Image: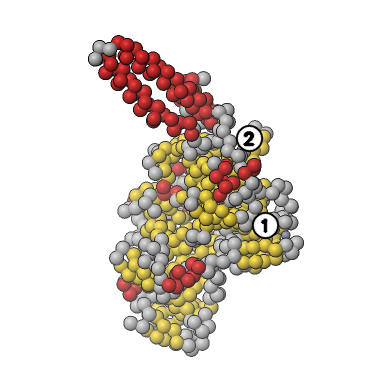
């Protein structure tokens, strides 16, 4: 049932197609038109929606857990840290129920408003009382970890919404992740706060992946050629919808990227060293196609010494980002994972744990440190700055590493930071990858990509590849042992004696491998804050 009315500002027809929507944007004059108590109110003009590389749009119809929905409205939120994200409003069954679908960096989270927050729920009354990594139990969702504490303001609106947005008003929120892709937001715009609960979803799960409009939009992800405003060198913005910063690889000028337009921010100085993999390189690693879009040099300080490493921001056309990290000739490929996949043992705060679990596997703390950005070139989806620091911790289970980074309050520069807390906790799961595979994957000179192996100084997450002999070796030992046993029982001392000798001879390679393995593990953990008990005992 469509209710049509005239815009109080310009007189054009404004349609409310959903019975439960509260406001709609007039398509002629961009006024926000509300319907309260049957009377039409005008809430003022809204600004244009900023172009983002979203495959979604108003009018799309999909499904979630058997219920059908239509996307009827959208708001754009300006994040305290500078980015913009889209929030879509899904009218289920003609508006009987509403879903909130937020979309940021290509990830979708669908939530529904939950019953009112009560005191028994132990949800802090203010966002300031939260700590990043803090875990709480939310009814029906279970244990959830706080991964972001921040503020955002609605900057633009289109279509029909189930609530009246307060344009420009910044609102505090806390995002939480739980296992099985569970996701919650606590919205502090009201007292008590409002709880939204749901999960991460994909276009496919929403029945939208095959929609012709979505397919068409996804194909439109194109790079954009621009000129460096400082040195006029030709630059390419690989992901214009999402990138917020670009640092010129020729002159070192840092620019903000606003819908493909560059604005000079700061002179970072010419990059000292060229990255081993040039910006714009295309390649394939682990069966995924990538393009290198950004490069960071970061460092940490330990006992007056500076240790630095390189990080490549890779972009895959599936609209997601990966990291390729090079430290001392060792390479790892990583991707952000949800904080909900991490649990911190008995601790109520995952960011303080010495051991964390992910996917049923225990990871040990290897090192915790402050990481500082020293060099920046290329483009980034956040407001990267030279000198920016994060509190980092690496947890290890070779060949994997879980890297936890906490960034708090972008050094007082964010426009909301004066009025409260802001911070994010991010987890990246990295897997060790042979240098030769990196070189081959990007078709680069193999002399720069030589596999490194040292018993004294392995990489924290480097696997002990010689350990592959253990299983066949043990099987062989067992086989020969039974053979000598059978020979002994049959009463043939000659054969029994010989198999005995074969057994001893065969044990040699296994024992040597075990000793090398011990040396390798000692080398690994001697670099670490943490020393396993069996290693302490052997020293
Ligand atoms: Zn109007
Ligand atoms: Zn330049």
Residue extending furthest toward the right: 231
Q: Is residue 429 above or below residue 464?
A: below
Q: Residue at x 38, y 18 (%)?
A: 503
Q: Residue at x 55, y 28 (%)?
A: 455
Q: Position of residue 333 (x, y in %)?
A: 53, 46
Q: Position of residue 379 (x, y in %)?
A: 62, 58
Q: Position of residue 387 (x, y in %)?
A: 66, 48
Q: Is residue 473 left or right of residue 316?
A: left
For label 2, the crowd category at 10 Å Cα-Cα, with few meaning under 14, some 14 to 19 and many 20 or more, is: few
Q: How many marks?
A: 2
Residue extending furthest toward the left: 490
Cβ of mark 1 under 8 A from ligand 2: no
Report which quarter residue 51 is drawn in.
bottom right
Q: CA distance from mark 1 to mark 2?
A: 28 Å
Quadrant of the frame with the N terminus: bottom left
Indicate the secondary structure of the residue bearing disc 1.
Answer: strand
Indicate the secondary structure of the residue bearing disc 2.
Answer: strand
Label at residue 247? 1
Ligand 2, seen in the image, is in the quarter at bottom right
Q: Is residue 485 above or below residue 111?
A: above
Q: Position of residue 295 (x, y in %)?
A: 63, 51
Report which quarter residue 265 is drawn in.
bottom right
Residues at marks 1 and 2 touching, judged by CB atoms closer than 8 Å: no
Q: Is residue 306 left or right of residue 452?
A: right
Label at residue 176? none
Residues 374 and 198: in front is: 374
Q: Inspect this view and state whether residue 71 appears.
A: no
Q: Identify the residue position indicated by label 2 in the image.
A: 302
Question: Which is in the foreground here, disc 1 or disc 2?
Answer: 1
For label 1, the crowd category at 10 Å Cα-Cα, with few meaning under 14, some 14 to 19 and many 20 or more, is: many
Q: Residue at x 40, y 60 (%)?
A: 201
Q: Inspect this view and state whether residue 357 appears.
A: yes
């Amino acid at each position: 049932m469509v209710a049509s009315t005239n815009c109080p500002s310009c007189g054009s027809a404004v349609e409310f197609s959903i019975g439960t929507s509260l406001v709609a944007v007039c398509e002629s004059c961009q006024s926000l038109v509300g319907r309260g108590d049957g009377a039409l109110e005008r809430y003022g003009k809204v600004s244009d929606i900023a172009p983002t590389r979203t495959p979604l749009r108003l009018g799309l119809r999909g499904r979630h857990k058997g219920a059908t929905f239509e996307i009827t409205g959208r708001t754009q939120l300006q994040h305290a840290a500078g980015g913009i994200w889209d929030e879509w409003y899904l009218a289920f069954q003609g508006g009987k129920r509403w879903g909130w679908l937020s979309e940021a960096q290509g990830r979708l989270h669908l939530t529904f408003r939950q019953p009112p927050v009560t005191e028994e729920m132990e949800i802090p009354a203010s966002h300031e009382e939260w700590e990043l990594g803090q875990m709480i139990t939310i009814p029906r969702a279970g244990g959830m970890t706080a991964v972001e504490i921040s503020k955002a303001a609605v900057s633009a609106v289109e279509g029909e919404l189930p609530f009246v947005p307060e344009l420009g008003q910044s609102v505090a929120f806390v995002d939480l992740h739980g296992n099985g892709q569970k996701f919650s937001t606590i919205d502090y715009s009201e007292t008590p706060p409002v709880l939204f609960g749901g999960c991460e979803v994909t276009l496919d799960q929403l029945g939208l992946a095959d929609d012709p409009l979505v397919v068409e939009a996804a194909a439109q992800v194109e790079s954009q050629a621009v000129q460096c405003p400082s040195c006029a060198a030709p630059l390419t913005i690989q992901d214009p919808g999402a990138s917020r910063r670009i640092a010129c690889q020729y002159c070192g000028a840092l620019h903000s990227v606003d819908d493909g337009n560059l604005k000079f921010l700061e002179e970072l100085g010419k990059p000292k060293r060229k990255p081993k993999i040039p910006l714009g390189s295309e390649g394939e690693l682990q069966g995924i196609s990538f393009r290198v879009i950004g490069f960071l040099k970061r460092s940490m300080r330990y006992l007056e010494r500076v240790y630095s490493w390189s990080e490549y921001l890779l972009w895959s056309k599936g609209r997601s980002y990966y990291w390729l990290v090079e430290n001392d000739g060792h390479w790892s490929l990583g991707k952000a994972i949800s904080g909900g996949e991490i649990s911190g043992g008995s601790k109520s705060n995952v960011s303080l744990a010495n051991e964390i679990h992910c996917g049923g596997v225990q990871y040990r703390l290897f090192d915790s440190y402050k990481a500082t950005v020293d060099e920046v070139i290329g483009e980034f989806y956040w407001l990267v700055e030279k000198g920016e620091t994060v509190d980092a911790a690496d947890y290890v289970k070779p060949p994997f590493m879980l890297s936890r980074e906490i960034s708090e309050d972008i050094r007082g520069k964010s426009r909301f930071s004066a009025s409260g807390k802001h911070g994010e906790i991010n987890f990246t799961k990295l897997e060790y990858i042979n240098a030769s595979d990196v070189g081959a994957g990007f078709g680069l000179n193999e002399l720069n990509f030589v596999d490194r192996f040292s018993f004294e100084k392995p990489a924290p997450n480097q696997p002990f590849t010689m350990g592959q002999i253990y299983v066949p070796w043990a099987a062989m030992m067992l086989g020969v042992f039974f053979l000598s046993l059978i020979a002994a029982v049959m009463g043939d001392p000659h054969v029994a004696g010989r198999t005995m000798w074969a057994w001893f001879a065969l044990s040699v390679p296994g024992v040597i491998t075990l000793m090398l393995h011990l040396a390798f593990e000692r080398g690994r953990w001697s670099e670490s804050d943490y020393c396993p008990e069996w290693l302490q005992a052997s020293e």
